[in-house]
Image (spheres, rainbow, N blue to C red):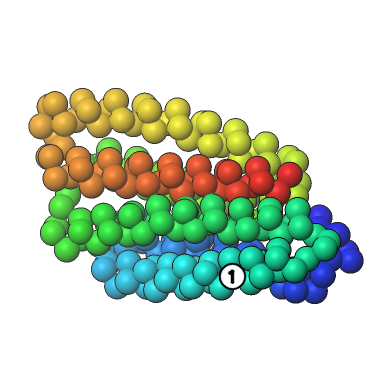
Amino acid sequence: MYATNMNSDLKGVVERISGMYFRIESILSLCMDGFMKHKVAMIDKANAVSLAIHDEENELIGLLSDKAAKATEDKYLIKTLMAVVAHIEMATNGLDGILRCVKEKVNEGVLFSDKGVHEISHLFKETLEITKTAGDAFLTRNEVLKKHITDKYISLGQTVDAYSEEHEDRLIKGICQPRSSSLYLNVVDSLMKVVGHLQQATDKIF
């Protein structure tokens, strides 16, 4: 938990950062639905949420930078919060890449194999679960949650490695087409970047 005597402005920053985690959850949910249901409208909604996160990040970095220049206390906390915001921004950049790929997939009518759809769906769900846990860890600074996120990140990396091998087999056998392959790999890579930055953001608060 954060100190009960924390500066009121910093309490407000913590609350706003917590809201950014919720927005990432929203983007993931909308993107997953857009992917599964081939609905561009859901991707457009997710893009709007992403823009809100980027705007929030710019405002918070500006606010925290000003506070860091003037503060005699809480400098370490301010630096930590700036690092968390930066990682959330980079995670959102990863989400932007996913949104572009999913929108292209829907607009171009690109099809994935049933196995590919299952794999992407699983990775979305795992990323969403990690995001929720990261948001809780940010607010509570709970060591158990931190370890859970680290373990899930490692496990997800192993899953992605296995999926990549299976994907290569599908490509060789002609089950997966080159255009589908490019989009699939970009989505998988971007999801891992999202999780990686959320894991790093969590590390910063301990």
Residue 89: x and y in percent read: 49, 58
Say which residue appears at 12% left-offset and 40% top-offset: 177
Say which residue appears at 14% left-offset and 58% top-offset: 109
Labels in figure, total: 1
Q: Nearer the viewer, residue 109 or 181?
A: 181
The answer to whether residue 185 is left or right of residue 84 is: left
Say which residue appears at 76% left-offset and 58% top-offset: 75
Q: Nearer the viewer, residue 112 or 85?
A: 85
Question: What's the residue type where badge 1 is placed?
Answer: Gly
Observer able to see residue 42: no
Residue 129: x and y in percent read: 55, 49
Q: Secondary structure at mark 1?
A: helix
Q: Alpha-carbon neighbours of circle 1 within 10 Å: few (<14), some, or many (≥20)?
A: few
Observer able to see residue 67: yes
Q: Which residue is mark 1?
A: 62
- Residue at far right of view: 5
Q: Is residue 55 above or below residue 24?
A: below
Say which residue appears at 89% left-offset and 66% top-offset: 5
The answer to whether residue 108 is left or right of residue 41 is: left
Residue 57: x and y in percent read: 53, 67
Q: Is residue 197 above or below residue 9?
A: above
Q: Quadrant of the C terminus?
A: top right
Q: Quadrant of the N terminus?
A: bottom right
Q: Nearer the viewer, residue 86 or 201?
A: 86
Residue 107: x and y in percent read: 17, 63
Name which quarter of the figure residue 61 lies in: bottom right
Q: Is residue 156 above or below residue 52?
A: above
The answer to whether residue 198 is left or right of residue 46 is: right
